[in-house]
Image: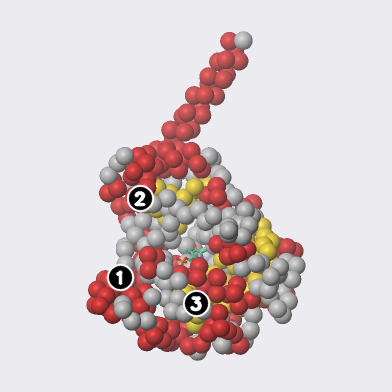
Amino acid sequence: MEPRDLSSHAEYVPGEGIEEVARELGVDPDSLIKLASNENPLGPPDAAVDALREHADGISAYPTSAHADLTSSIADRWAIDDEQVWLSAGADGAIDLLHRATIDPGQSILAPEPGFAYYPMSARYHHGEVTHYNVPKDRDFAVTPDALLEAYDGERVVYLTSPHNPTGATVALDDVEEIADRTGEETLIVVDEAYGEFADVESARTLLEERTDVAVLRTFSKAYGLAGLRLGYALVPEKWADAYARINTPFAVSELACRAGLAAMETDDHVERSVEVVEWAREYMTAEIDAPTWESGGNFLLVEVGDATAVAEALKREGVIVRDCTSFGLPECIRITCGTEDQTAEAVEAVNDVLADLNRGDAESADEEAEAVTDQ
Ligand SMILES: *Cc1c(COP(=O)(O)O)cnc(C)c1O
């Protein structure tokens, strides 16, 4: 007895963790800075940690009321009906829920390339197929309706990531609307706003007023600093309301995740401070890094460094863990998460040192080659 044939299914490659890198290098984990997974450098909000402690005794019961309370609180925040909020284990969980609710075997999704790896993974194991649209580097990774629609061929779900991971580019609301208008009635446009708090663009939530073909993904993992809890949600069209009860895993979100999420939503200042730190760090990195970068609406910056794997390895030895974007299909780029001021300054110094070293190395080997040529 074996699992079904999963040979065409890719594994998710997460950013490297502090503990594993510390073990690999034989150094103290405290000496490392992790800027590889777009986590919140300020940590979780105190109110959420207090709520976890306060409710720890309650975990012998299923989370019925906490789930309902968090759903209502999110619905209020977005001025939407409770039934239109689909709580999930991270926004990743919401991607699964949307696929369960939409994909019949053999139907396809249309996903960005480069882009977030979980859309195709989830579609495949929900018996769906995957096609891609190109997010063109030579046009600063702009997603335009014309380019996307050229790739579109009646897919059941189309993913837009705004701000996009790993490029940081945003999609204007007018363009989302145009894409929704120009795709078929049976196509759902999913706008993944995992980094929505950090960008100066309006949420696609607005489009749910008039439309039945747009859904929005949000998460507590990034601006709220609760990645370890696994808490996110989808906002879905009114028409979709009753599908959740039919496809949701019973109590997919834990009691403690709900309690912490509720507490986090009641304290806006943590999100505000997180956004401020990110705005500062993006600007600082853009100005100070000696390599090309792209404008980012996320809590990270994409940097063109040449050989991303070599640079990421060298940075690790300098104590800074960044994301090598080779697995995203950008082997010449790294993605650096915005850290605190100290972390960001240290990371920038390390990046510039590593780039200078590698360039010097290149120049030396070019010299050696030139010498070898003249020797002949
Ligand atoms: C981080 C991220 C998510 C969601 O992460 P969860 O931790 O599952 O909420 C979704 N989409 C993109 C593009 C992301 O970068």
**Amino acid residing under circle 2:** Ile
**Looking at the image, is mark 2 or mark 3 nearer the viewer?**
3
Residue occupying the point 54% across, 40% down: 306
Disc 3 target residue: 249
The image's colour scheme reads: secondary structure
User: Given the image, on which type of amino acid does mark 3 rest?
Assistant: Thr
Q: Residue at x 37, y 68 (%)?
A: 229
Which secondary structure, mark 2? helix
Q: Position of residue 307 (x, y in %)?
A: 53, 39
Q: Amino acid at mark 1?
A: Pro
Residue 297 visible, this orientation: yes
Residue 108: % across, % down: 69, 67
Say whether disc 3 or disc 1 marks the residue closer to the N-terminus.
1
Q: Which dot, 3 or 1, sits closer to the camera? A: 3
Q: CA distance from mark 1 to mark 2?
A: 21 Å
Per the rendering, the mark at residue 45 is 1
Position of the N terminus by quadrant: bottom right
Mark 3 surroundings: few (<14), some (14-19) or many (≥20) residues within 10 A:
few
State the mark number for residue 18. 2
